[in-house]
Amino acid sequence: MAGIAVERTGISRRDLEALCFIGEQYAVRADQLATRLDCNPRTVQRLLARLREQRLLDVRRLLVGEPAWAIPTVRGLRIAGLPFGLWRPRLGGLAHVSAVTDVRLHVQARSPESEWVCERTLAREKQTPEAHLADGVVLLDGKRIAIEVELTIKSKRRVLGIVDELLGRYDAVLYYCAPGPHRLLSELEREANWPSLGIRALPTTASVSR
């Protein structure tokens, strides 16, 4: 499908891969895309301009002082071969979307052989409405590792329920947390003794690109 898309649109395979990455993550900041492609900001600006010109994505300044966000259009999603619907940004959810992308960049930089299954794909494969949806799943060495990105503190009961559920469905669970949730998860991990739970500090785009 990607080959057909390249032929029909005239965009490069690299541009198509960038569009697919953006679509899988809902939306991606320009600096995150630069990290993903290992290129400088000017190259990313030219890429985004090309894709916007072809109506494959929108580029918006959503938060003051932050880089622009790239958001695929329906046409862009279809050209990328992605079956997802159009995503409309909510300011309250941008921090989490951004943090999940930082975690994906971090994980794949350290384990290039791993495969990332995005939340949007997991949502389409969801078996029951009440099942908890991980922020991503990493396939590595024959194991399925659920990824959770936590920016805010949830109740202990809620966290216990999520971890127990995910450990029942995956080989391991890896949490990337802001300081508050990190302390709570560490406390619960000592109490519950989850051998397949890992707790990490949140990476940033700047730290991934070093």
Image (cartoon, rainbow, N blue to C red):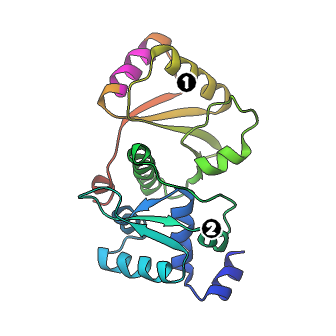
Q: Nearer the viewer, residue 133 or 110?
A: 133
Label 2: few (<14), some (14–19) or many (≥20) C-alpha neighbours in 10 Å: some
Give, as a single range, the part of the protein colored magenta: 181-190
What is the three-letter code of the residue carrying label 2?
A: Val
Which x, y percent locates residue 15? Answer: 51, 78
Q: Residue furthest top?
A: 191
Which x, y percent locates residue 116? Answer: 57, 52
Element marked by disc 1: helix
Residue in the picture at 37% in, 75% down: 44
Above or below for 50 versus 94: below
Residue 122 occupies which quadrant of the picture? top right
Residue in the picture at 47% in, 70% down: 58
Write down the residue under mark 2. 74
Q: Main secondary structure of the magenta part?
A: helix
Quadrant where the image shows the N terminus: bottom right
Q: Which of the numbered marks, if any, corresponds to residue 26? A: none
What is the three-letter code of the residue carrying label 1?
A: Val
Residue in the picture at 35% in, 27% down: 182
Write down the residue under mark 1. 163
Q: Residue furthest right?
A: 127
